[in-house]
Image (cartoon, coloured by chain):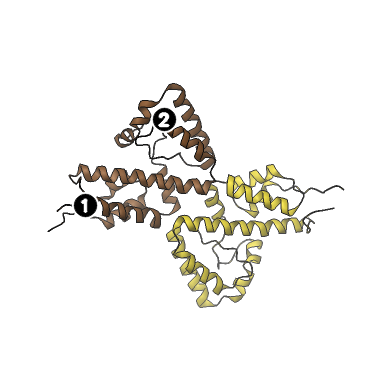
Chain colours: A brown, B yellow
Amino acid sequence: MEVEMLELDEKELFVCCGSTQFAKEMAKASPFSSLDQAVSAARHVWFNLVDVNGWLEAFSAHPQIGQSPSSQWSKAEQSTALATATESSSQELADWNARYRQKFGFIFLICASGRTTAEILAELKKRYSNRPIIEFEIAAQEQMKVTELRLAKLFSAKGKASSTAF
Amino acid sequence: MEVEMLELDEKELFVCCGSTQFAKEMAKASPFSSLDQAVSAARHVWFNLVDVNGWLEAFSAHPQIGQSPSSQWSKAEQSTALATATESSSQELADWNARYRQKFGFIFLICASGRTTAEILAELKKRYSNRPIIEFEIAAQEQMKVTELRLAKLFSAKGKASSTAF
């Protein structure tokens, strides 16, 4: 029984998570025998190897939530939010995004998949009261969720929908 | 019974902790009626208001531990370390400092006051195995200890050795 391996290059990995160090370390760990193996490697690299500057680099690669996303992937991830936005909720979200960025020094990051604008706004307001270091770690966890979704899409696009090939 | 107030300006505060935001917020909170009040304000500003970029800014204001410090205060804080350093321990410390910086993206920070080179080296090796986010918070706590010592010196230098003036 041979396991088919999937090779991912730095460029593809950087689209999953915009940290140069993440993309480099993951490319070194590639190829992967399954999505599970890739996700497990990604979690290790992101939480243990990528330094705080790398986290900030990856955060800055995202569009502001609620703003017209430039990438296809951000657009798909924010489709529920975009479909449920009204003019006033969009404005409120923009205002809170600005307050958040002012306080924390990086963009508000949330795995938006399946969430409405109202849910995202409620989460933003709740997280706004956190201490900067706490919020920094929460944002990193949200980034990891986004990375996992994108790795899954990458595997799927490359004809690897199942986690292991028999 | 009147309490004498001590005014601290941004420049003095920046020497205690090299974050622009810290110095600004503390200058706003000045004058202080006692060292205790100043330390309490400093803790609030550092842990709740200064963002992660501000932490990195403050870390980068320190000399590498074990290297000839340029400021009088760093020199005094590292006097025990400097007095107990041998050629080989200095070299080992320099090597580990480089490894630490390579892994975490910022300088190894420790409140060196009263610690020997051997103690500092042992602590560096122990902390080196931490995850980046954990180490980031530990470094911030060490920075706060340094800030407290420097605030105390500032109060003392300005003729305010006791915590409250009656």
Name the element at disc 2.
helix
Please state which of residues B94 and A33 is positioned toward the viewer in this rendering: A33
Q: What amino acid is found at the position of numbered circle 1 in the picture?
A: Glu
* Labelled disc at residue A28: none
Identify the residue at image location x=46%, y=63%. B100
The span from disc 2 to disc 1 (Cα, nearest Å) is 36 Å
Q: Which mark lies nearer to you, 2 or 1?
A: 2
Please give the chain letter of the residue carrying mark 2. Answer: A
Q: Position of residue B145 (x, y in %)?
A: 62, 59
**Depicted B39 relative to depicted B80: above or below:** above
Q: What amino acid is found at the position of numbered circle 2 in the picture?
A: Thr
- Asked whether residue A68 appears in the rendered view, the answer is no
Please give the chain letter of the residue carrying mark 1. Answer: A
Q: Which residue is mark 1?
A: A7
Task: Tell me if mark 1 has few (under 14), some (14-19) or many (20+) residues whose alpha carbon lies within 10 angstroms of its own.
Answer: few
Task: Tell me if mark 2 has few (under 14), some (14-19) or many (20+) residues whose alpha carbon lies within 10 angstroms of its own.
Answer: many
Q: Earlier in the sequence, mark 2 or mark 1?
A: 1
Q: Position of residue B129 (x, y in %)?
A: 44, 64
Residue B44 is left or right of residue A2, and the answer is right
- Asked whether residue B123 appears in the rendered view, the answer is yes
Please state which of residues B79 and B131 is positioned toward the viewer in this rendering: B131
Name the element at disc 1.
loop
Q: Which residue is mark 2?
A: A117
Identify the residue at image location x=48%, y=73%. B92
Q: Position of residue A75 (x, y in %)?
A: 32, 33
**Depicted B73 relative to depicted A127: above or below:** below
